[in-house]
Image (tube, rainbow, N blue to C red):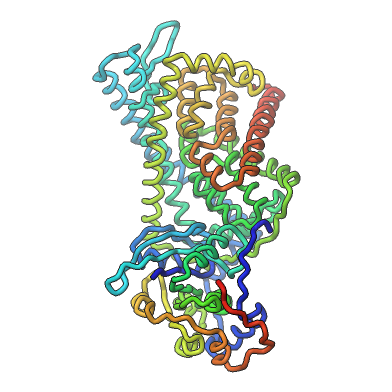
Amino acid sequence: MKILLMGHPNVGKSVFFNRLTGARVFESNYPGTTVDFMKGWMRLEGEDVELIDVPGTFSLEPKDKAEEVAVKMLTENKDSVVVCVLDASKVERGLYLALEIIERGYPVVVALNMWDVAEDKNIRIDVEKLERILGVPVVPTTAISGEGFKELVSKLKEARPVKIEEIVERAGAGKEGGGEVAAVSG
Amino acid sequence: MQVKKEVVKLPLSVDERWDLIEKITKQTVEFGAYKHTLKDAIAELTVKPLTGIPVAIAVLYGFWSFFCDFAGTLFTDGFMVKIFDEHWLPWLQSVFPGGLGNPVYALMVDAGHLENGVLVPSDNCFEAFGVLTSGLFVPFGVVLWAVLAFYLVFAFLEDIGYLPRLAVLVDTVLHKIGLHGYAIVPTFLSLGCNVPGVTATRVLETRKQRFLMITLLGIFIPCGAQIGIMQDLVPELMGWIFLTLAIGYLGFGYILNKIVPGESPEIIMDVPPYRMPTLRNIARKLWIRTSRFLLVAVPFVLLGCLIVGLMYLTGAMDWLASVLGPLLIVWFGVPKETVAPLIAGFLRKDLAVGVLGGLMEQGVMTHFQVFTSVVLLCIYFPCLATFALMLKEENWKEFLGSLASLVVMVFVYGGLIHLVGLMLGVA
């Protein structure tokens, strides 16, 4: 099993990576700190698991070299669990990437990072409901201080691929338009 | 686009995906009333031009003052020069076997120099030019402190989140040269070391932007090591040097942007909120970057010292000086001895400026020649490490393009500086 850390630029993936692996990759407060992937190892239930810090990307249609690296990492590591790191104060945009990854058939765990910032901004997220709709584990985290990491790690094994149709159904309405449901070919 | 993308058919179309997200977030996310905080007020003050530009100037000035005071005055002048020139060098001169004139002694400790036809010993570590004297003084006496000071402030600016705001401020100017405000990040990184600077160009969108950026970085941005030693050697010239490099960066960028085909699209960039830096992260970055510097730079500086020393001893340097002398003298207006720092510059720029320092101490150069040489050293060739990375990051065509730009630039700009000097009557 491998774990990929993915998410928008500057949501704290590198902080996750350092916390989980004890490695020392650069963390900065600007988008584009990581432009190449980094690999490290973490212990998961007595097992050594490879963790990859993927450069930030907004979607799976790459716009620059760093995003190309991100998409390449995803397609090259088909057997991975993806930890999709979202900025909890900007859930919508983060969900776009998360859904794209789910649609490609990867098991996903969603980390709602910068939970503290979202709280400061008076944004309230119903984590349980989000988890129910998405059908994947959702964990609020504050990477800088390490809150939520224990829970995140414990949920890694629960990650399963989810059919997007089920998410659409649970979100409340049938899929309009339909038609182009193609097999996810990776 | 030049990238062949692997086409993956996803179940949802872009619109359908956004619809779904809306449905999900409507049920799960609630936005409370947002209070305008002090942090927001500061954030706004630093991006609006009217207040942002003075803030930027203050920040950069503070950065520079700290750099000079901490690295230059406190450590280098306060401790290191004294330790190296008053204790280390005389001690080595007294105990190292061989003595003045012996080749091994010359390579390792002090080559000495001719004064009225008599070989005299050096009295400082710039001039001595031995592996154990200058070779250690350059990295440990001068450059280490400059690198430390630079990365300390830089890590702080990084973690607070100031850099993207600086990017917003300089966006308009950088668009004139086909770059985006975000180019300030690779530029700033390059002021520490060009190697991570070149890597950071990956955030730029098109190959054209990357090419422009890498070429400009390679030519015009001196690294922290080089700045540190220049500051130690010619503090009074630093303003002119930076001005000359900035004019070159912008002017040449403007021209390159006109002649290089390709697009320079607008990138929409996130400005992150200000955050409190953690001491842990700053300390960690400082440690990684400094140790990386020591690991990479020190062997190169020592090797460079040895090579330059050997070239002097074998007469290769004199031969090169006489071959390239006419070009250097006529075109650039610098003495033929400048060949030595130029050779050293292939390996490390800090070492090259160190060699130049030795020449200055011997009094073979005028003030203006020192200025020209320092600028030439900046622009004529990126150091070996940067050069290797350019080869890796660019394709062949781009790489040759960067090289060609470099050659043209050195001759045009170097000649121009000489010409201006002649017209002003200082050359």
The picture places residue B243, in percent across and down from the top left corner, at 62, 39
Question: Could you tell whether B135 is left or right of B37 in the image?
Answer: left
Whether B177 is drawn above or below A53: the answer is above
Residue drawn 35% across and 63% down? A41
The picture places residue B114, in percent across and down from the top left corner, at 43, 11
Q: Residue furthest left?
A: B95
Residue drawn 65% across and 79% down? B13
Question: Could you tell whether B372 is left or right of A177 in the image?
Answer: left
Q: Residue furthest right?
A: B258
Whether A136 is drawn above or below B361: the answer is below
Q: Nearer the viewer, residue A175 or B168?
A: A175
Whether A162 is drawn above or below B131: the answer is below
Quarter of the image that includes the N terminus of chain B? bottom right
Residue drawn 47% across and 18% down? B362
Quarter of the image that includes the C terminus of chain B? top right
The picture places residue B8, in percent across and down from the top left corner, at 61, 71
The picture places residue B282, in percent across and down from the top left corner, at 40, 57
Q: Nearer the viewer, residue B2 or A173?
A: B2
* Numbered label tally: 0
Q: Nearer the viewer, residue A19 or B390?
A: B390
